[in-house]
Image (tube, rainbow, N blue to C red):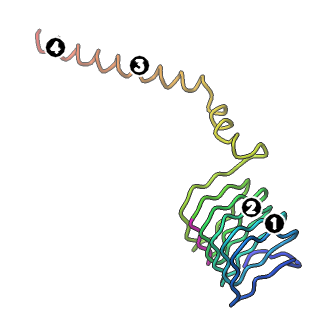
Amino acid sequence: MGKTPEIANCTIGEGSVFNGKFYVNGSILIEGKFQGDIKTDNELIVGPTGKVKTDIRAKRVTIAGTLIGNIKATEEVNLIQTGKVLGDISTPRLNVELGVVTEGKVTITSENGVGAVSKIIKESFGNDTEAIFTAVEKDKGRDTKDKDKDKSSESIG
C-alpha cells in the first residue's frame, strides 16, 4: 500500500466501528468502519479493510479501501490499486494506480485554490483564442454559402 505515515496519531483498527465526529491533530489510519465527520491537519489513510462514509478534509489522503464521500486535500490524494471512491476529489496532486474504481468529479487545484481553477483555465485559453474560433466559424459559413452559390450558377449555365 503506498506510503504510510511513520506514526499514526490515531488508528481505527480492523473490526472496529466508529460513528460520530472525529477531529485529530496528526495522522489517522482507518482499517475498520467509520461514518460521520472527520478532519485532520495531516494525513488520512483508509487501509485496504477500511470502509468509510464521510467527507474528508486533510493535507494528504490515501485510499486503499472504500470511501463514500468527498475528498478535499491541500497537498495530495493517492488512490491505491484496491481503492474505491464514490465522491468528488479536489487536490493539487492526484496519483491513481491501475485497478482503482471511482466515480465523481475531479478538480486538480492550483496554489490559488479551488475557486480559481476555472478562472485560471479561461484566462489561459484567452479571449483572443475565442475570437479566432468565432472568426473561423463565420468564414466556414461564408465558404458554404459561396459553394452553394457556385453550384447553383453552374446548373443554370
Instruction: Give the amino acid at mark 2.
Output: Arg
Q: Secondary structure at mark 1?
A: strand
Q: CA distance from mark 3 to mark 2?
A: 48 Å
Q: How many marks?
A: 4
Q: Residue at x 88, y 78 (%)?
A: 6
Does the CB distance between marks 4 and 1 fall below 8 Å?
Answer: no
Mark toward the start of the polypeptide (3 vs 1): 1
The answer to whether residue 148 is above or below residue 107 is above
Mark toward the start of the polypeptide (4 vs 1): 1
Mark toward the start of the polypeptide (2 vs 1): 1
The answer to whether residue 46 is above or below residue 133 is below
Instruction: Tell whether position 119 is magenta.
Output: no
Q: Main secondary structure of the magenta part?
A: strand
Does the CB distance between marks 2 and 1 fall below 8 Å?
Answer: yes
Q: Residue at x 70, y 46 (%)?
A: 114
Q: What segment is highlighted magenta in the picture? A: 82-86
Q: Which of pointers 3 and 1 indicates the residue nearer the eye?
A: 1
